[in-house]
C-alpha cells in the first residue's frame, strides 16, 4: 500500500473509528506490524470492536486497497 492510501486509512481510523493518534503511533511501530494488517492489530489489542473491524474492511474495499 502506498503512502497516500496509508494516510487515507489513518485519517479514516482517527475520524470515523475514533482511534487516537497515540494508539495508532504505537501500533505503527509494533513488531507484529510486518506480519499483520493494521486493522487486525487494532482489533487484537481491543482498540476497535468486531463491528468496527468489519466497517474498516468495508471501507478498505470501497477504497479498493488492501489493509496496511
Image: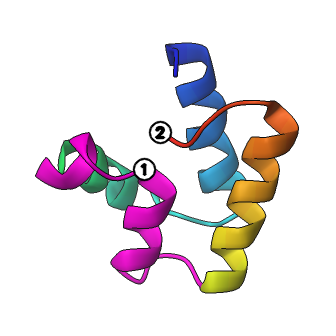
Where is 64 relative to 20, above or below? above
Secondary structure beneath label 2: loop
Count numbered badges in the picture.
2
Horizontal side of residue 57 vs 24, given as left or right: right
Where is 34 relative to 14, above or below? above
Horizontal side of residue 42 vs 29, given as left or right: right
> Mark on residue 4?
none
> Mark on residue 68?
2
Q: Position of residue 48 (x, y in %)?
A: 54, 77
Q: Position of residue 5 (x, y in %)?
A: 62, 24
Where is 5 relative to 19, above or below? above
| Residue at the right extreme of this rendering | 62
Q: Position of residue 42 (x, y in %)?
A: 43, 67
Where is 33 relative to 41, above or below? above
Q: Magenta span covers which residues?
A: 31-49
Q: Position of residue 23 (x, y in %)?
A: 35, 61
Secondary structure beneath label 1: loop
For disc 1, the marked residue is 37
* Residue 52, image quadrant: bottom right
Amino acid at each position: 500500500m502506498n503512502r497516500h492510501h496509508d494516510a487515507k486509512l489513518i485519517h479514516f481510523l482517527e475520524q470515523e473509528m475514533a482511534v487516537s493518534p497515540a494508539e495508532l503511533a504505537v501500533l505503527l511501530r509494533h513488531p507484529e506490524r510486518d506480519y499483520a494488517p493494521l486493522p487486525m492489530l487494532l482489533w487484537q489489542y481491543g482498540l476497535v470492536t468486531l463491528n468496527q473491524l468489519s466497517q474498516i474492511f468495508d471501507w478498505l474495499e470501497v477504497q479498493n486497497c488492501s489493509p496496511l
